[in-house]
Image (cartoon, grey):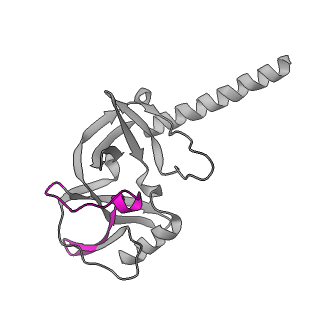
Amino acid sequence: MANSNAEMAVGQDVISEANAAMDKKAAGKYLTFRIADEIYGIEILKVQEIIQLQEITKVPKVPDFIRGVINLRGKVIPVMSLRNKFRIEDIEDTDNTCIIVVNVSSSKGTVIMGIVVDNVSEVLDIDADGIEESPSFGGGVDTSFILGMGKVDKKVVMLLDIDKVLSSQEGRAIEEMGK
């Protein structure tokens, strides 16, 4: 029995160390934005710029969450709707709707793409103590794209790993669009 308790203590230490490593990795500055009533954040180092919504050219035979492409200073970049990707009811664009241009790491390097959000909020500096691991929703729910849950004041900010929002297959399709 004592051996079992010792093993449990060692197991708890391993879990604590893993959580601490995750917290240190996730701590930092995040650009926060809204989609519907929820607040999300992405690492500020992944953000290239924020631009006003502009005309998006539709591309046939792409997934529903891909709005199309835009011309950003002579470079064609793909644009994704996070509303559609996260299966949140679509709404009409407003004056606050904007595009966050991000650098997404892929197997072939960095891909520049735009993500359409309802509005951009602010840049928050979230320390390790303010970040918790994302909750488990069971085996059938993929939350690998969530870095953690940031606690700011009385709000919860879902911290996204923008590199993992797209599946590897979707990422390859985006890479091809950006060429």
| Residue at screen point 71% across, 29% down | 11
Please provide percent x and percent y for residue 107: 50, 65
Q: Measured along the vertical axis of the image, is residue 138 above or below residue 67?
A: above
Q: Is residue 127 magenta?
A: no
In the picture as drawn, the residue positioned furthest to the left comes out as 95
Along the horizontal axis of the image, is 97 left or right of 103?
left
Q: Give the mark count.
A: 0
Along the horizontal axis of the image, is 94 left or right of 65?
left
Please provide percent x and percent y for residue 137: 56, 44
Along the horizontal axis of the image, is 61 left or right of 52?
right
In the picture as drawn, the residue positioned furthest to the top comes out as 2
| Residue at screen point 16% across, 58% down | 94
Q: Measured along the vertical axis of the image, is residue 179 above or below residue 140?
A: below
Q: Measured along the vertical axis of the image, is residue 41 above or below residue 86?
A: above
* Magenta part of the chain: 69-96
Please provide percent x and percent y for residue 164: 47, 56
| Residue at screen point 24% across, 54% down | 118
| Residue at screen point 38% across, 66% down | 111
Between residue 121 and residue 11, name the one nearer to us: 121
In the picture as drawn, the residue positioned furthest to the bottom comes out as 60
The quadrant of the picture occupied by the C terminus is bottom left
